[in-house]
Amino acid sequence: MITLEKRPQPSQFWSLFTPVLAVIITMIVGGLLFGALGKNPFEAIRTIFYDPLFGDFASYSRPQLLVKGGPLILIAIGLSLGFRAGIWNIGAEGQYIVGAICGAGAGLAFYPIESIFIFPIMVICGAIGGMLWALIPALLKVKFGTNEILVSLMLVYVAEQLLASMALGLLKNPEGFGFPGSRNLNDYPSASSWINEGFGLHWGIAAAFIAVIFAHVLLSRHIMGFNIKLTGEAPKAARFGGVNPTRLVIFCMCASGALAGLAGLFEVSGPSGQISIDFNVGYGFTAIIVAFLGRLHPIGILLAGLLMALTYIGGELAQLTLGLPSAAIQVFQGMLLFFLLALDLLTNFRIKFAVKGAA
Amino acid sequence: MKFTKLLASAAVALGLASAAAADTTKVGFIYVGPVGDGGWTYEHDQGRLAVEEAFGDKVETFYQENVPEGADAERAITQMALQGADLIFTTSFGYMDPTINVAKKFPNVKFEHATGYKTADNVSVYSARFYEGRAVQGHIAGKMTKTNTVGYIASFPIPEVIRGINSAYIHAKRVNPDVEFKIIWVYTWFDPAKEADAAKALIEQGADVVLQHTDSTAPQAAAQEAGNVITFGQASDMGEYGPMPRVSSIIDNWAPYYVARTQAVMDGTWSTVNTWDGIDTGMVEIGEISDVVPADVKAEALAMVKALGDGSYHAFTGPINKQDGSAWLAEGETADDGTLAGMSFYVEGIVGDIPN
């Protein structure tokens, strides 16, 4: 008979090892799935995990990993701060959109003036935009006790409507023949976030790495990081210890909103180039998976973001070269989270193979 | 820039490689929805299969489905070019800028962008005059509606969609002065759940005809459930919903165009074109009109199809005023392609504003 026994302390070993195990199991089950679809499972797995890194056209796809992973990491780092303290910002997608609108709007307001000050202004506006959008659920929570999960999620849909309105109205390209969408910021050198397109480097990637370092320092050295961790692990102790829950909620929501807003700004001024109706493609939601896949740890998130990007790029390659349906790739990505959550059991519980009758 | 050089050299290397590889022409397709959507993407994929059938071993096709319009599209197109495609069809409006950007980096690859307006030395654009089909739909809708309310599920407020609304409205109004259009904007090309919600909302508001400019069959299913509501197949025949609710359809037939363009690449005669074909060349087809439609209405509709096809009738023939009452087309005047291509206004009589 198999029984579960709660561990007195979450296992350190399993906490680190479950993501790796989840990836391996996903490969095996995913391989079976691809096999059932009539594709060579080994070739499919190789195409997804190996080809983007070392395949024939890796010189193109490697930088793309950064382009795809950058915003995921940036957003996930912000989310992880709140998640650690039990503050659930689910609406990063909305903050990402508003950050992009504010940043791009600030840049376009100066068009066509060229100046080195424009991009920094856009960055600040993008961060503030995302922060303010996240401040709404934060304030509602601390003033009226509303649920930040629901409010932040609902604000995503509000943000999407705002985005559509901007693409069709205020920010619409006056030279776009009436078609929706803003001017392309890639054609406006002062407002472009690209550092070097060939290496997939734009300021968003740099910001993601900086955010990882800052988050690491914050969590391991700073009193705020200590308060965050304490609140998450022992809310009562935190309160006795003098942690101000209101301040913590505001800080965590604003930090995650600002980082999501930055991600949106860097995306709109780089890879995407313009505010359009369907500018957002779900980074804000995928980042939630990335945050958990990375165990809410900055370094873990860095790796998880790159891994997630790999499944995206590799998945696209598998579609192209093997003709795998895109739904199969989505199932594959979903499995990753599923197995991770399932295996989390091992972190908190011990599996015991009890001898019959002894229990 | 380094990147351009890198890609160009990769492209050259590929060009050499593919020249050595027994002259197979590789044709790629970027789809906005899944190939099984039963509408827009399904018809493009039928075109792809027609290319395979026409050229057999001499051609190799591949595709990527569900590609979001935006940054991801640029990567998808680039990957396709890197994989050695000679000709790439990007089949949604939102792929316009990405297509142009990638085309700059791969001067030896030919690109064809559907429904856009930006061309380049190696980028052609093509679209179909769906508004001709809308005229026929409008006529049938105006005749058939008993509640005088026609529902319209609109995707994005771009000229192509606005043109369709105007064309359908003009022809419904002509046969039924009391007709009213209710328009819902769903901001998506393909989202069965949203499309079904929109259809239900329209039916609840009294619409007994539902027109759609979205790609799934969800509105058809919603109409079927409601009972006495009629619909039209969009992009594809959607014949499985006939004879009720689907009474006719606009079918996009891309196959001849795709075959011809592939042939041009093989022959080395490919050049940049701006194609906008309608019922005349068969790019727009009107699906069979079912028996639910009274015989006289059916005959009128077929006569209109014929007139649109042989050019004796234009779907936008004056007198037509703009929504604000200002004159647009005088008696007997027909709209020019430039105005149609950038159409951003409603015609007189339509209630509501184009969202902005």
Image: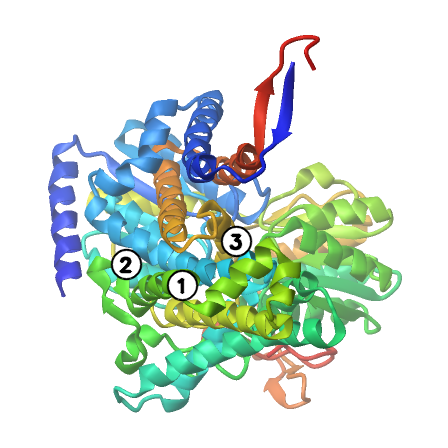
Q: Which residue is mark 1?
A: A215
Q: Amino acid at mark 1?
A: Ala
Residue B88's place in the image compared with B315, above or below, is above
Instruction: State the CA–CA distance, disc 2 to disc 3.
Output: 31 Å
Q: Which residue is mark 2?
A: B102
Instruction: State the CA–CA distance, disc 3 to disc 1.
Output: 16 Å
Q: Is residue A55 left or right of residue A309?
A: left
The quadrant in which the N terminus of chain A is found is top right
Q: Can residue A309 be seen in this snapshot?
A: yes
Q: Amino acid at mark 2?
A: Val
Between label 2 and label 3, give the one nearer the viewer: 3
Residue B349's place in the image compared with B98, above or below, is below
Q: Tag 3: Cα neighbours inside 10 Å, few (<14), some, or many (≥20)?
A: many
Residue found at the very far top of the displayed protein: A356
Q: Which residue is mark 3?
A: A288
Residue drawn at (29%, 76%), measured in percent from left and top? A187
Q: How was this image coloured?
A: rainbow
Q: Tag 2: Cα neighbours inside 10 Å, few (<14), some, or many (≥20)?
A: many
Check chain identity for marks 2 and 3: say if they share one.
Answer: no
Question: Residue A349, which numbered label?
Answer: none
Q: Tag 1: Cα neighbours inside 10 Å, few (<14), some, or many (≥20)?
A: many
Residue drawn at (35%, 36%), measured in percent from left and top? A48
Name the element at disc 3.
helix
| Residue A246: x %, y % from top left | 64, 74
